[in-house]
Image: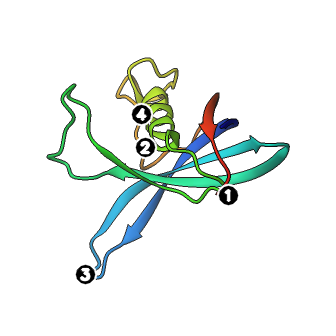
Amino acid sequence: MTTADFFFHGLFPDHIEANEGAGRQICKVLFDVDFEGEFYSHLLADLWPVDEKAWEADGRPIYEVRYDLPFNCDEFSKAVVQYYQQVMGPQSTTISHSGPKGPIPNRNVYRVQWSISLAASKK
């Protein structure tokens, strides 16, 4: 098995409308990836909490991640969640001009560079 080098660039809000008109907020994660000499640019992954009441044992929400990669990479979903938590978590370096209210993911675009190498295989 070889590795794929992922380069995350940012996350931004998006909105999905349900059939009844009640939408839900998601975040899109922008990334590039280098796999076996091929470079794939400007790829997107969608991320949102599965259920407001569903939590992992460590108290963090459970997320659903949807993406389409040109190869198999089982650990990619975990990396997207890790990136999101790094950007939005308490160690975030975001600054608000209106005071320390914390980041608001449905109103801001975050440009944060991060890279990780993960095991991957051809489809």
> Which of the pair 61/109 is nearer the observer?
61
- Circles 1 and 3: CB atoms closer than 8 Å: no
Question: What residue is rendered at 69% in x and 36% in y?
Answer: 2
Image height of 48 relative to 75, above or below: below
Q: Nearer the viewer, mark 3 or mark 4?
A: 3
Q: Which mark is residue 103?
A: 4
Q: Which residue is disc 3 drawn over?
A: 20
Amino acid beneath label 3: Glu
Q: Nearer the viewer, mark 2 or mark 1?
A: 1
Check disc 4: other Cα within 10 Å, few if <14, some if 14-19, many if 20+: some
Q: Secondary structure at mark 1?
A: loop
Of callouts 3 and 4, the N-terminal one: 3
Q: Which mark is residue 105?
A: 2
Which corner quadrant holds the N terminus?
Answer: top right
Q: Position of residue 88 (x, y in %)?
A: 43, 31
In the displayed orientation, state which residue is furthest to the left. 53
> Which of the pair 65/49 is nearer the observer?
65
Q: Which residue is disc 1 drawn over?
A: 70
